[in-house]
Image (tube, helix red, strand yellow):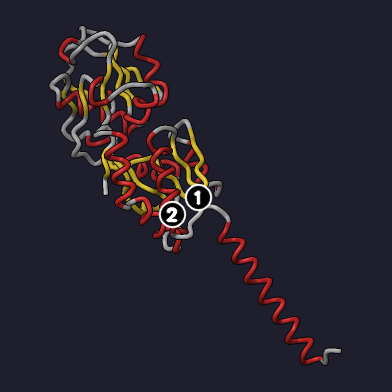
Amino acid sequence: MLNKRQLLKTTLTAAIAATLATGALAQDKPLKIGVTAGPHAQIFEQVKKIAEKDGLKIQIIEFSDYVQPNAALAAGDLDANSYQHKPYLDNQIKDRGYKFTAVGYTVNFPIGIYSKKVKSLKDLPEGGKVGIPNDPTNGGRVLLVLQDQGLIKLKPDAGLRATPLDVVSNPKKLRFVELDAAQLPRSLDDLDASAINTNYALSAGLNPGKDAIAQESAKSPYVNLIAVRDADKDKPWVAKLVKAYQSAEVKQFIQTEFKGSVLAGF
């Protein structure tokens, strides 16, 4: 029979073991990472393999739009997301009050303009309809491409978040049709041209290098990133996640798989 001292020691040992076991179970719970379907999801499948070698388990959750991954991260349904560039993140933080931090750069998707009706932007008809993303940052990207191509001029202070209201010169009287980014590939039958983010273009079977009639410069501020809640930014798993993403193996996969339509931004 155990005396009181032995009984107390046994009880404490059992309590410590239970605590350690609980901690171990908590660490075994996979991180939930939100991505959009297409290249982001494909790349994270590779990141998942690399991260597992470092003891990090990942569950990939795919989304079909640009709004829900941030909403889910804010609600605690995700631990991180990987699908947006900094101008978009900054806009979301400003408009929605999210407490997010960018912890590492990922890839760059040069936005392209596509058409089933013309072979070149100069062939767009007067009054032609051009589809652009309906969020300020991606819509602004397209307007800047059109300005670079000489089709329009924007107010000098329009910046990265230019909208059709900032157009001060439009010789062809182009009409801008603002749609959700995911809907733009389906608009090609109805519009004269549409600007489509690379991930949605690839999902729709378009080849950015061959099919785009105009494309954003590779040197742009739109490199994508991994975002986490502010409260999590210094947790050890964050550094491991970024390390796995920015590994040589993942960079090689990006180069081999996408052949220049998606660029490593790290």
x then y, percent, for residue 203: 39, 26
Q: Marks 1 and 2: CB-CB under 8 Å?
A: yes
Upstream in sequence: badge 1 or badge 2: 2
**In this view, 75 is above or below 36:** below
Point 59% across, 65% down: residue: 24
Calculate the distance from the C-alpha at mark 1 to the C-alpha at mark 2: 8 Å
Label 2: few (<14), some (14–19) or many (≥20) C-alpha neighbours in 10 Å: many
Instruction: Give the number of the disc on residue 58.
Output: 1
Q: What residue type is disc 1 on?
A: Ile
Would you say residue 162 is visible in this rendering? no
Point 51% across, 53% down: residue: 57
Label 1: few (<14), some (14–19) or many (≥20) C-alpha neighbours in 10 Å: many
Instruction: Single out the residue that lies furthest toward the left.
Output: 150
x then y, percent, for residue 13: 69, 81
Quadrant containing the N terminus in the rendered view: bottom right
Instruction: Give the number of the disc on residue 169.
Output: none
**In this view, 11 is above or below 260:** below
Closer to the camera in the image, 8 or 102:
8
In this image, 216 relative to 1: left or right?
left
- From the image, tell me which residue sits under label 2: 51
Instruction: Single out the residue that lies furthest toward the right.
Output: 1
x then y, percent, for residue 259: 26, 33
Q: What residue type is disc 2 on?
A: Ala
**In this view, 124 is above or below 204:** above
In this image, 7 relative to 149: left or right?
right
x then y, percent, for residue 204: 38, 22
Circle 1 — which element?
A: strand
Point 47% across, 31% down: residue: 64
Instruction: Give the image quarter of residue 22.
Output: bottom right
Would you say residue 54 is visible in this rendering? yes
Closer to the camera in the image, 219 or 244:
244
